[in-house]
Amino acid sequence: MGTALITFSSTHSGKRLVSLAVLLLLFAGSSAFQALSMAAAADTPQSAEKIDDQRLLGHWLRPDGGYVLELKEIGKDGTLKAAYFNPRPINVAKAVLSRKDRSLTIFIELRDINYPGSKYNLQYDPKTDRLVGTYFQAIQGATYDVEFMKAKR
């Protein structure tokens, strides 16, 4: 690679050129930093807003089997009033909503015939308006990836 040699006829114009170069570098660095900061903020889920947990209320359909999760009421302590259908009602022993790092997580425990402690651990995805997570099927001792879509009613 070659090197460039710049000569100036006066020291005064050289100082101006150096000052201009420093200003341009500072401006370019500042703009690049701002662009990177904005891109990072855009990738952070819910970076500027808290998710309204009331969006969770209603009927949620698990498309791989027609299972329905109904979220009826959210208590101030995080308890949920919930119902589960396959297609008949299955007893919901426990339902809890947790808020952490601007995300909403739902835990559902089922206790009924053929559901002796089966559990859902779901997280709300505001970008797709879905509940995604895992389902532990207690009788089989197996865990499955699942998702629920908001049912249109």
Image (cartoon, helix red, strand yellow):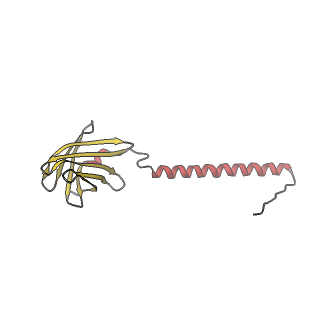
Q: Is residue 34 left or right of residue 53?
A: right
Find residue 127 and report its horizontal and vertical position in percent: 37, 55
Identify the residue at horizontal 39%, vertical 42% (top origin): 101
Furthest residue toward top: 77
Identify the residue at horizontal 87%, vertical 51% (top origin): 10
Furthest residue toward right: 9
Front-most of residues 13 and 128: 128
Which quadrant: the N terminus? bottom right
In this view, 7 is above or below 54: below
Front-most of residues 16 and 84: 84
Identify the residue at horizontal 25%, vertical 48% (top origin): 57
Find residue 146 and report its horizontal and vertical position in percent: 28, 56
Which quadrant: the C terminus? bottom left
Find residue 134 and report its horizontal and vertical position in percent: 29, 52
Furthest residue toward front: 141
Name the image quarter holding residue 99.
top left
Residue 151 in sight: no
